[in-house]
Amino acid sequence: SSVVQADGLYKLLMKGKHPAGLIVETADTVLVTAAVAMEIPMVHKVDPEFFSEIKDGDFVHMDATNGVITVKS
């Protein structure tokens, strides 16, 4: 559930191990609220193909303000 996701994000934040940003296909209200409260940038409504195209070791840069994601292998 998204409540569990929010709790997990909070625990990571408290340990200094939270993600630099979130890239999601569909963001629900709880996840968006958690990201805003924890000041974690997020891009949503990402094409599902994006997730099958990226691989371990890729560098992903996200511009959450403009919704732009750039991947460098």
Image (cartoon, rainbow, N blue to C red):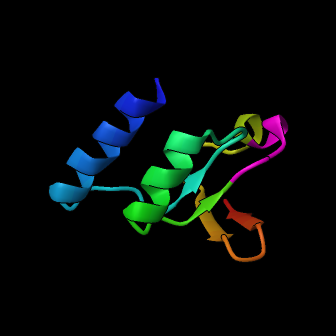
Q: Is residue 11 magenta?
A: no
> Residue at the spot x=55%, y=54% of the render?
22
Left/right placement of residue 23 relative to residue 25 reads left
Q: Which residues are magenta?
A: 44-50
Q: Position of residue 28 (x, y in %)?
A: 62, 39
> Residue at the spot x=49%, y=53% of the render?
33
Q: Position of residue 10 (x, y in %)?
A: 27, 49
From the viewer's side, name the closer residue of 43 and 31.
31
Q: Position of residue 13 (x, y in %)?
A: 25, 57
* Residue 23 visible, this orientation: yes
Count of numbered labels shown in the rendering: 0
Left/right placement of residue 6 relative to residue 52 reads left
Residue farthest along the top direction in this orientation: 1
Q: In the picture, residue 52 is in which quadrant? A: top right
* Residue 56 visible, this orientation: no
> Residue at the spot x=50%, y=41% of the render?
30
Q: Is residue 70 above or below residue 52?
A: below
